[in-house]
Amino acid sequence: MKPVKGYIERKSMLYVTGVEYGDYTMNHVLGCAHGCKYPCYAFLQKKRFGQIASYEQWLKPYLVSNTLEILDKEIPRLKAKVKSVQLCFTTDPFMYGYDEIEEMSLAAIRKLNDAGIKCTVLTKGLLPIVLADYSKENEYGITLVSLDEGFRERIEPGAASYQARLAALKALNDKGCKTWVSVEPYPTPNLIEQDLMELLEAVAFTDRIIFGRTNYSKEISAYTNHRAFYNEQAEKVIAFCKKRGIQFHIKNGTMVAIGEK
C-alpha cells in the first residue's frame, strides 16, 4: 500500500456540485495518483487556480485530515438541503493502493449514512465489499471507457485494472447494492478502435449507465467525424439500456446536430 504525500486542513467540505446529475459533493483529497491523461479536468482546474503546480505534484495526493470534524459541523446545518453526496468530483475516494484514503472515505460515508444522507460513489479504484453493509440507498459506480488493458495502462496508468474494477462492482451488485457505470470520457477511434457493444454487455448487470464524450483533447478535435461518432454511440447506449431495462443518462453536449461545434 502507498502512503499519502501529506495532510492538509480545510474549512469546508460539502458543496453543491453544479453537475447535471449531481447534488452535493465532497472532495477530501487534493490530487490523484491515477494520473489520467484524457486530460483530467480536475487537474486542469486545480492548476488553473494555483492549487497544483504540475502533473507530478498532482500524482502525490494529500489527505484532508479534518474531514470528519468538518462533516460533524456541516451535516446538521445542511441535512435538510442535501439529497445525496457524491464522492468525488475532483479526486477519487478509493484511490488505488491508498489505504488511508479508503479508510477516510468509508468513515465519511458511514457518517453521512448515519445522518440519513445517501452517498453516490465513483471510482477508478476498487470498491470495498464492506460497502454492502452500508445504506442500501447508496449508489456505487466505476468509470469504464474500455476493456482494453493496454489502453488503460496508457491513459489511466495509476488506476486499477478494468477487470478488477468490474469484479468489485459486480460483487456489490450481487450483494443487492445499487450500482452504476460512467462510460466517460469515451474515446474516439483515433485513440482506440473498439466495440462499444462489448463494453455495454460487460456492464449489463448494473442499474444505470452514464455516457459522455471526451472533452479538452486535441486528439478529439483532430478526429473530424467526432460529432457523428458520438451521436451514433449515444444512440447505441440508449437502445441497449431501453432493451435491458437499465437507467441511462447521456451527458449534455454528447449528442449534437452535425453542424454544431
Image: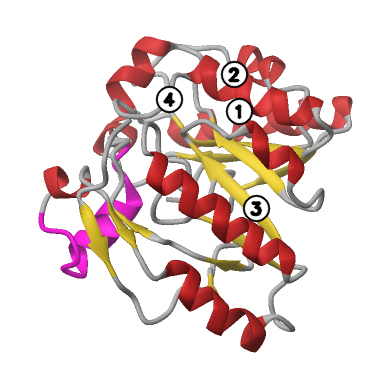
Which mark is first along the chain, 2 or 4?
4
Q: Magenta segment: does it hold 187?
A: no
Q: Which residue is mark 1?
A: 233
Which mark is first along the chain, 3 or 2?
3
Closer to the observer: label 2 or label 3?
3
Are the two marked residues, 2 and 1, in contact with CB atoms closer than 8 angstroms?
Answer: yes
The N terminus lies in which quarter of the figure? top left
Are the two marked residues, 1 and 4, in contact with CB atoms closer than 8 angstroms?
Answer: no
Q: Secondary structure at mark 2?
A: helix
| Region rendered in magenta | 38-53
- Amino acid type for the residue under numbered disc 2: Leu
Q: Residue at x 56, y 12 (%)?
A: 195
Q: Residue at x 17, y 59 (%)?
A: 52
Where residue 164 appears, x then y in whole percent?
53, 18
Disc marking residue 196: 2
Disc marking residue 160: 4
Depth check, front residue: 232 or 78:
78
